[in-house]
Image (tube, rainbow, N blue to C red):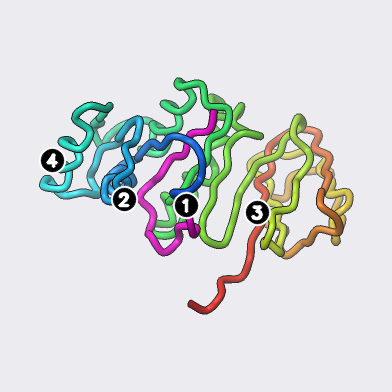
């Protein structure tokens, strides 16, 4: 089952036709308000809602009257996005797609992109994607070592997250071998065919597929 999570990132970063994608929705903080504005009824609206006004929160509460609405204090261990992902996991999602997670505040963006580093979220490698207008982020580890080319995405990037041992990019345009973690981004790689294979001894790799933004 696919569940989409909309966080509170700026609308201009949303991919086109995002709401035509399959799956149920969960709104994290202002993302829930965005869903309400689009007329989409999420399974859950969750967060501390510090990014919405009291009037907006009241509207959202009324909109969610027959669905779940969970308000948390600002001082908490999980971010609003992580709370939404936990709920998606509890619903049995085997695919979680995160939108509205980039742009805006950099601390929020980095937190969203590194979610699988948390021990209790590590199992999301292979099932979590972060998608915006120009990019799609997936994750690799020792059990997930193949990337499939996305239509319209020209560039391929790799970034070790945390400690990484024995990482190889095997059949991309620019092969790479790392015996120990470097922590840097390896960007502007490219596919030769439809698949790229890697080898990972241990650790997690963030993978980006990106395209240049067209003038609009």
Name the residue nearer the viewer: 12 or 81.
Answer: 12
- Look at the image and tell me in which quarter the N terminus lies: top right
> Marks 4 and 3: in contact by CB < 8 Å?
no
Q: Earlier in the sequence, mark 3 or mark 4?
A: 4
As drawn, 178 above or below 118: below
Q: Earlier in the sequence, mark 4 or mark 1?
A: 1
As drawn, 70 above or below 174: above
| Rendered residue at 43%/40% (across/down) | 5
What residue does disc 1 label?
A: 18
Asked where in the image residue 62 lies, by quadrant, the reply is: top left
Q: Any magenta on residue 3? A: yes
What residue does disc 2 label?
A: 38
Residue 179: horizontal and vertical position, in percent? Answer: 84, 43
As drawn, 93 above or below 147: above
Question: Relative to residue 191, is residue 1 drawn left or right?
Answer: left
Q: Earlier in the sequence, mark 1 or mark 2?
A: 1
Which stretch appears magenta?
Answer: 1-17
Mark 4 surroundings within 10 Å by alpha-carbon count, few (fewer than 14), some (14 through 19), many (20 or more): few
> Marks 2 and 1: in contact by CB < 8 Å?
no
Question: Relative to residue 162, is residue 182 drawn left or right?
Answer: right
Q: Earlier in the sequence, mark 3 or mark 1?
A: 1
| Rendered residue at 67%/62% (across/down) | 152
Residue 26: horizontal and vertical position, in percent? Answer: 38, 36
Name the residue nearer the viewer: 106 or 195.
Answer: 195
What residue does disc 3 label?
A: 208
Q: Could you say whether the residue bearing mark 1 is in a helix, strand or loop? A: helix
Q: Earlier in the sequence, mark 2 or mark 3?
A: 2
What residue does disc 4 label?
A: 58
């Amino acid at each position: 089952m696919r569940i989409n999570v909309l966080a509170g990132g700026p609308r201009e970063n949303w991919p086109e036709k995002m709401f035509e994608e399959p799956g149920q929705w969960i709104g994290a903080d202002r993302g829930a308000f965005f869903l309400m504005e689009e007329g989409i009824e999420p399974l859950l609206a969750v967060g501390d809602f510090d990014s919405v006004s009291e009037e907006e929160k009241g509207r959202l509460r009324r909109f969610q009257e027959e669905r779940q609405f969970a308000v948390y204090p600002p001082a908490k261990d999980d971010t609003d996005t992580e709370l939404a992902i936990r709920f998606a996991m509890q619903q049995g999602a085997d695919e979680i797609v995160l939108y509205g997670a980039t742009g805006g505040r950099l601390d929020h963006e980095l937190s969203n992109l590194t979610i699988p580093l948390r021990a209790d979220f590590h199992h999301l490698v292979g099932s979590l994607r972060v998608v915006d207008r120009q990019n799609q982020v997936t994750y690799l580890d020792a059990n997930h070592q193949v990337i499939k080319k996305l239509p319209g995405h020209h560039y391929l990037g790799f970034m070790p997250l945390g400690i990484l041992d024995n990482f190889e990019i095997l059949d991309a345009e620019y092969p790479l071998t790392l015996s120990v973690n470097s922590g840097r981004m390896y960007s502007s790689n490219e596919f030769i065919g439809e698949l790229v294979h890697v080898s990972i001894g241990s650790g997690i790799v963030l993978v980006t597929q990106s395209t240049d933004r067209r003038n609009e």
